[in-house]
Image (cartoon, coloured by chain):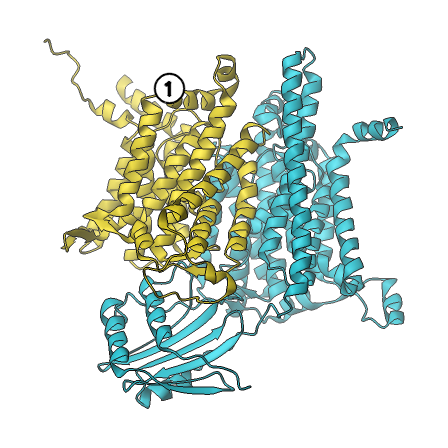
Amino acid sequence: MLRPVSNFFSKNRNYIPLMSTAFLALAAYGIGAYFFAGMRNPQVFFNLFRNSSFLLISGIGMTLVILTGGIDLSVSGVVALTSVASAVLLREGWNPWGVILLMLAMGMTLGALMGSSIVYLKVQPFIATLAGMWFARGMCFFISDNVVAIDDRVFQILGKTKILIPGLTELAVKQGNPAPYISIPVVVAFALLIIVIYVAHYTRLGRTIYAIGGNEGRNEQSARLMGLPVDRTKMFVYTFNGFCSALAGLSFSLFVASGHGLYASGFELDVIASVVMGGTMLTGGAGYVFGTFFGVLVLAVTQALIQFIGTLSSWWTKIVIGVLTLIFIGVQTILANRKEGRQNLPATSALVAARRRQQRLAFGIVALVLIGIFSFSRFGLASQTETTESAQCEIKPFREEEAASLITDGAAIVYNRTAGPECVDELFAIYPDGRVTGNDGVNSVEEKVDPAEVEQALVQISDEYKWFTDAIYGRYLTPCRQCFAHYVSISYQGQEKTVSQVDGTASMPAGYTLTLAVIRSLLPDINPAP
Amino acid sequence: MKTTARPAFTWRDITESRLFFPILAFSLILLFDFIFIPRFFVIENRDGNLHGSLIDIFRNGSTVMLLAIGMTLVIATGGVDLSVGATMAIAASVAGILMNPSALNNEVFFVTDPNYTFQPLWIVITSALLVATLCGLWNGALVAYMRIQPMVATLILMISGRGIAQLITNGLRVQITYKPYAFIGQGWIILPFSLYLVAIVLVLTWFMTRKTAIGMFIESVGINFRSSFYSGIDEKRIKLLVYTFCGFCAGIAGLVASSNVRTSDASNIGLTTELDAILAVVIGGTSMSGGRFSLLASMIGALVMQAITQSMYAIGVPAFALQAIKAVVVIFVILLFSEQVRSFFQRISTQKKEV
């Protein structure tokens, strides 16, 4: 009875990863729609594409690179560089269309540079593109340190134009929903997808790309011996990926309407993961461009699900994507090993046994992972019922003026703490005479501590932790949602210094942490009024 | 004893030594510092301990040096381990949470008592290293037994490892105030304590690879794993060993890094250090396709990376823009090593001789 099924699978073995990804994406969306009414809204479905248009664009280019057996880690750098450079050029008043063309040219140039070092200088793709990423990311900060907003009219039109879906508008209006729409980058991404599918599967160039990849570089040699233009094709692939990265960068900056050098960190991993999930072999030579579309969809659905569950933190996305990548690579490996096994006809019993053991191990690991996911989902649901506190809080700005007035009133230390797990906004002032006042905007508190203790703390802060030297500097980062943001003003022996910083980052000076610890030990709790 | 006609050290011997290029690069950077940065080479004596910019290069470079030891062996087998940064974060999170578990409940975020720890130090260190070693074992199993490409296999842990670390610390940055732990990264016994750690690991590794057959096995697996298999080397076990060891080294590096900033910061500890470590090994002259390796050259490679960082900071290049300069240096170094350029130079020198 199982024979037709197994026949079907063995005939269409190449499509298995593709089909399983498509199935996974749809199943995940279905489960989400079953549990969360919000996910049934058609706009949520189309938002999957709107939120991941840049991922799809970049994934298309990456698929070609991976098909030739290479890899491109520079995409996130190029995306960030594009966002910063275009934002700054627009601020300088350049023509927006000129900026777009320039950015695409820049991406292609970077891609061509990396490609030529890979092809002609025989640098490993991994290293060359890594250097490319560092270079691009570093250049962002030479251009601008800060977030640059994009308020150009053409860019706004491109980013915010709603393209209604024909046929769905009436349906949605009938149900009382606003008409679902997609954005221009989505259309661009789909157009690119169709073009690249055509190129990859129906042209000579595409066949050369497939011929180069796979078999640990041996196929490249045979392609060369067959007289295929290997070097030219590889150059094309890397240049094209540079183009795709720049295009992804443009659609990313349309999406966020600003540019900054820290945008899209870790983006290349998402892209690679979605290509792998789409069924493309990382060794190259096998896979489908269309599969990448489903890979991107899986990623988007995962993110949407985690957002909808709400209590799960964003890092679960990373874990889930890692696990999914592992499963797909595991499946690929098993399929590849089987194929190899068929080719090696004189298989001794020892080899067969070894392969069996290998397969059992692989299945075991996959099973373990599945159990892991299962227990995770139960844990996730359990935590959902336990905690109901809102995960996000609005970070309030520092009360700088209030702090300054407190210092002029004679306070020695003014300490403002915002955000954190409970979204506090507390402002404390410690006076040299031991008086400590505090308020969180609603309630206030006043307490006396030993003046000697305050003096001791001040001595410790200024002498031991070198508060008034350059060792303590302010670096404001956007606080993560469970971290506190601190603002400290200290006035001691005629010296005055104010530092604002988010706590706990690795780049924070050690003395700053200890200073905060000293200050915190003096503070009373602000209890809400009963 | 008759002296041979050939002197013991010729110029050729020196230039063809594996250490020549890394040392040349390192001294070029130091020369740059000597010219452009005042007081760079001043070493102060504070309470019998040595402080100074030069010492700082060694101290801050100790994490990359530790990673480079493990990475050299992995790269020598023809693999690569991208997950060391994530492994560092995992080890640091385990250590942080064992010392200050109250951070999990969002309370006592600031434990100020420098003598407070939840578990004794040896448990903290052992379990952190154990978890890191397990991470390495996992990578090794994927590479050796499931035959997944090393880059891909370790990419999985690179993606999800940081998530796991954040899971352990509940997404918080756990403050570490326990004094004895801080000694790992910040302590000094004349020289920074972390340097002694590097020295111990380096000497042990050197002994294991050069005084036993393991080093030769690693090289032979890197050159051709199939023929190593046929000549009776259990290449799978060798691969498992090097990845596990790399995880262990990353664990120590994680402890040093977290004690250095007195925080277990799951999202920032070891971020992009895997790249530094790989480049340190590449600068050290070990080929990415495997084969012969030199631990000492990798160490100097790590110092080169750190010296670049430190000198750029000293002349006021912002931290993020530094990456661009690093990239240029790396490309330059790699081009120097590439066969095309080398053969070009060889051609020139042979032409000269013919003339």
Residue B79 percent coordinates (x, y): 49, 31
Q: Determine the image quadrant of residue B214.
A: top left
Nearest to the observer: residue A238 or residue A331: A331
Q: Secondary structure at mark 1?
A: loop
The chain in cyan: A
The chain in yellow: B
Nearest to the observer: residue B53 or residue A56: B53
Nearest to the observer: residue A450 or residue A269: A450
Residue B343 percent coordinates (x, y): 38, 25
State the residue position of label 1: B213
Q: Quadrant of the C terminus of chain B?
A: top left
Q: Is residue A386 above or below residue A489?
A: above
Q: Residues within 10 Å of mark 1 (few under 14, many from 20)?
A: few
Tell me what residue is drawn at x 31 percent, y 27 percent: B207
Q: Residue furthest bottom?
A: A409
Q: Is residue A167 above or below residue A404?
A: above
